[in-house]
Amino acid sequence: MQGSKDRVSDGEKIRTLLEQARRLARRKRQCANTGHLILAAFQSDRQASVTLSRMGFTEESFSQVIDAGKANDEAPSMMELAVERAAKIANSFGSPGVGALHLILAIIRDPRTTGSRCLEDIGIAAGYAAAEMMAVLQQRVSAADGGGPARAAPSEPFKGRNRLAVQAALSAKLSKASGGIAADAAELRGAVLSGADLQGADLHGADLRGAVLVDADLRRADLSGANLDKACLRGANLSGANLTGASLSGADLSGAILTDCPRAPSSQEPTVDTNDKSNRRD
């Protein structure tokens, strides 16, 4: 752990971002927070700017949310915690140093941060943003390896595995308690399951809040009673999946296939891109 702290303290880029965030806050007579850190990264780091812009981020809309008062209730220690977590993320990807993308990912992953909440407020789901950041970081790993096959990121344990392997891994988390979901099912909260083959998976009552299921194959999966609040299901195939009683508040279903999905009426509606014609129920 000491090595991670040393690398952070010696990282000129991180020190520069922290100081830039504090300057942004001082100009508006605000307390510096992780939202200002994201703004600083967007302004000064080209890859961070490109990645955030691709998700629909604009400096103007994000600044407006911060100015509206989201910055007032973040603990003073959150910026330092984000930097420490960014170092751990950089280590997990084998990166030689801590950069803006590691820092943004660390902020996004913690729902207590002003940065994460402000992104949600401008319509960028935390799970989707985290998946995008991880994809870019993974591309860096692949490029550093000479363009060979990308190494699986430590936080993406299910990606690329077949259905039996994925379901076996999930079963270990879900089957310890007799007659229902295990207490440690909460470990699936925020899990990255992009591209996973989960056809027919038994996920009844599972806690999948904030999970990233981009392009996942969930045909005929049992998701009855599952909590999918703020989950990112972009492009997922949910044909024949049982969503009866599932909570989908704030879930992103853009481009998802929803053919023959039983679902009880609910006032908690998911986020659906009405301009995306690939999202369909028939």
Image (cartoon, rainbow, N blue to C red):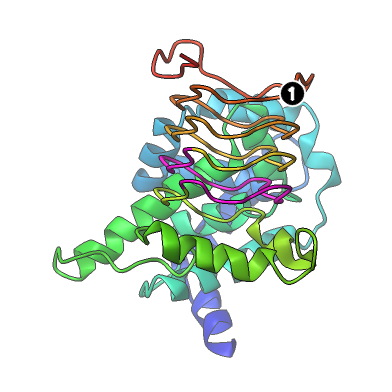
In the rendered image, which residue does mark 1 sit on? Answer: 264
Residue located at (55% from left, 42% from top): 221
Q: Position of residue 249 (x, y in %)?
A: 72, 30
Between 117 and 193, which is closer to the camera in this rendering?
A: 193
Q: Position of residue 173 (x, y in %)?
A: 65, 67
Q: Is residue 227 left or right of residue 12?
A: right
Residue located at (53% from left, 58% from top): 103
Residue located at (76% from left, 32% from top): 245
Q: What's drawn in magenta, residue-wise?
A: 199-219
Quadrant containing the N terminus is bottom right
> Helix, strand, or loop for circle 1?
loop
Q: Main secondary structure of the magenta part?
A: loop
Residue reaching furthest right? 73
Between 242 and 214, which is closer to the camera in this rendering?
A: 242
**Amino acid, disc 1:** Ala
Residue 204 on the magenta span? yes
